[in-house]
Amino acid sequence: MDCVADRAFGGVFVNALDYVVLLGTILGIACYGIWRTRDQRTFDSYLKGHGKTRWLAIGLSVMATQASAVTFLSTPGQGYESGLGFVQIYFGMPIALVIIAAVFLPIYRRLNVYTAYEYLGQRFDKKTRLLGAAVFLIQRGLGAGITIYAPAIVLSTVLGWRLDVTIICSGLVVIIYTSLGGSDAVNVTQKHQIAVIFMGMIAASIVLWSKLPTELTLSDTLALAGGFHKLQAVDYSLDVHKRYTFWSGILGGTFLMLAYFGADQSQVQRYISGASLRESRLGLMFNAVFKIPMQFFILMLGVLLFVFYQYHQRPIYFNQAAWKNQAQHGNQQQLEELQARFATAHNQQQHNLQTWIEARHHNDRSTENEARTSALTLQEQMEAIRAQAARTVDPQKKTNDSDYVFITFILDYLPHGLIGLLIAAFFAAALSAKAAELNALASTTTVDIYRHIIHSSADDHRCLVASKYFTVMWGLVAITFALSAALTENLIQAVNIVGSIFYPVMLGLFMVGFFLRWIGGAAAFWGALIAQALVIVLYFSLSISYLWYNFIGCATCMIFSVLLQTVLSAPTHPAGFPPIE
Amino acid sequence: MAESNRDHTAAENEDGTDLPVLHAWAAVYAFVLGVFFVWIVLLTVLSGAFS
């Protein structure tokens, strides 16, 4: 325990063995990706791969693209703070992926498109295609830095690395292998990166489980977690102001996932590269089956961390670097006082927990309930002390302390070597998501902007070279954004807003294209713009969960398109898209 | 550009899954949604049992 305390409060976290594991893993995978895709010669294979990608590789690639480093760094912290409720956001995913596999995917493959927005051009017109591509480029382009920045800010803080060096190094690695190998390099590296991530998470779980008190059975552990309201996975409340409920997950989540998997090029590019329609479909079904268990597992890891820290001394504020920095700048006495109060409460809690578990073992319900009530009351007091500490250390709420829970456990309790593996897992997650983004941004810029508008006579070789340049360009944009820390704080908010209010309407365009085939380009385009204006007004005037905008945006786009088509002109049937009989 | 690929994708068989038991895609989708339903039930039971 003393050793742990030394490490948590400023000792050397990472030794040579950890660095060997970290650098060997990250650079090894990147070099392997470059070597495997060294004969990438054509524009088609650069954007779509060699056309032999099997379902498991597609499934893992789709999973790795969605799961950024934040998923593995922050989600356990979310489980620690709020329990399992976040899993409900994924309830729409199986439904959305079935719709995409059955409807979207066959059309993308039949039209042999490079980007989802090409479909909009073929189904509607040039301006609608540009609208879709522009929304994607703005959203992903603005967000390009966040995928690198978010994990870098946490890892550099706790490891004592320079933030700018962390961002630049990870950014350059991903730029090099993505620009050289294209879509295939993304697929090949993602397969190995997700393997590293799974190995790291499983290893951390085993260590965590082994360090829980031996007298705690699985049932006791779940009873403790449930007693502190951490196992409330499903909430059937109809309250639209609650962020995560069963209904917002099913309805809003389905449209959110439809927009992300069906209309976001970073995902579309992953599954259209399959060797056949069958492989692409099975890759999507793999995610439809395994995504909810995966998120449940990561959140459960956070819940177990909560139980673990009931029995082990935990820092009042997990971001110890910020804590120490604040202590050195005049607030030392106040922070020490808070720390002492927190430690006293923690020690008192041991008595409540012991009584609780003993009563449970003796089937003494009355004493068990009494001890549980006392433990909950004390827990509330401890949370109040933590909140006071957070206000003192970070009055502007620039960081979320729950992001530091899992990494603190890793650094304090995992053996060397495994620490390196876990840090490698976080970087692998960041690189895999970033690579898919860069690949998609470059593809859309080349296909929907460069070849479509700027240089329509460009041959394949010229487009291939342009794609590589655009990959490097977007990578540098990402690094630049990530380095602008002050700007990025506001940028994260802006990107989240853009994603919440623009993507649903873009999905509406695709839904009109797929399901309302009698509607033409003009009605769809102007219907989308009107719907977008309405969603923006609603976003800034209502306070409902953001998940609902995914349904509202898509539905209003479809309704306005129908109304405009009815009012403006006779129905149109573009070539290749006959009306539904 | 990529005409052979286009011909290939246009001609690919959209009906076969080549999976044991689940021969049609409709069966695959029903299986996936069935697994999802089981998860909802399990999570609901977990929420209720330890609340």
Image: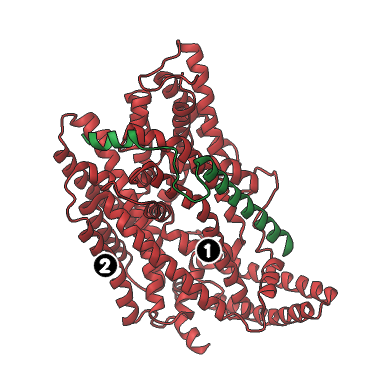
As helix, strand or loop, the secondary structure at mark 1 comes to helix
**Circle 2 crowding by C-alpha within 10 Å: few under 14, some 14–19, many from 20:** few
Q: Which mark is residue A317?
A: none
* Colour setup of the view: by chain
As helix, strand or loop, the secondary structure at mark 2 comes to helix
Going from N to C along the chain, the mark reached first, 2 or 1, is 2
**Residue occupied by mark 1:** A298
Residue furthest to the bottom:
A2
For the point 36% across and 63% down, which residue is it? Answer: A193
Q: In front: A255, or A114?
A: A114
Camera sees residue A486: no
* Chain B colour as displayed: green
For the point 38% across and 79% down, which residue is it? Answer: A417
For the point 68% across and 52% down, which residue is it? Answer: A235
Marks 2 and 1 in Cβ contact (< 8 Å): no
Disc 2 to disc 1, C-alpha distance: 26 Å
* Chain A colour as displayed: red
Image quadrant where residue A369 sits: bottom right
Q: In front: A73, or A34?
A: A34
Is B30 on the left-hand or right-hand side of B48? left
Camera sees residue A321: yes
Is A259 on the left-hand or right-hand side of A461? right
Q: Amino acid at mark 2?
A: Leu
Chain letter of the residue carrying label 1: A
**Circle 1 crowding by C-alpha within 10 Å: few under 14, some 14–19, many from 20:** many
**Residue occupied by mark 2:** A27
Chain letter of the residue carrying label 2: A
Question: Residue A34, how many percent across, how many down?
Answer: 22, 59
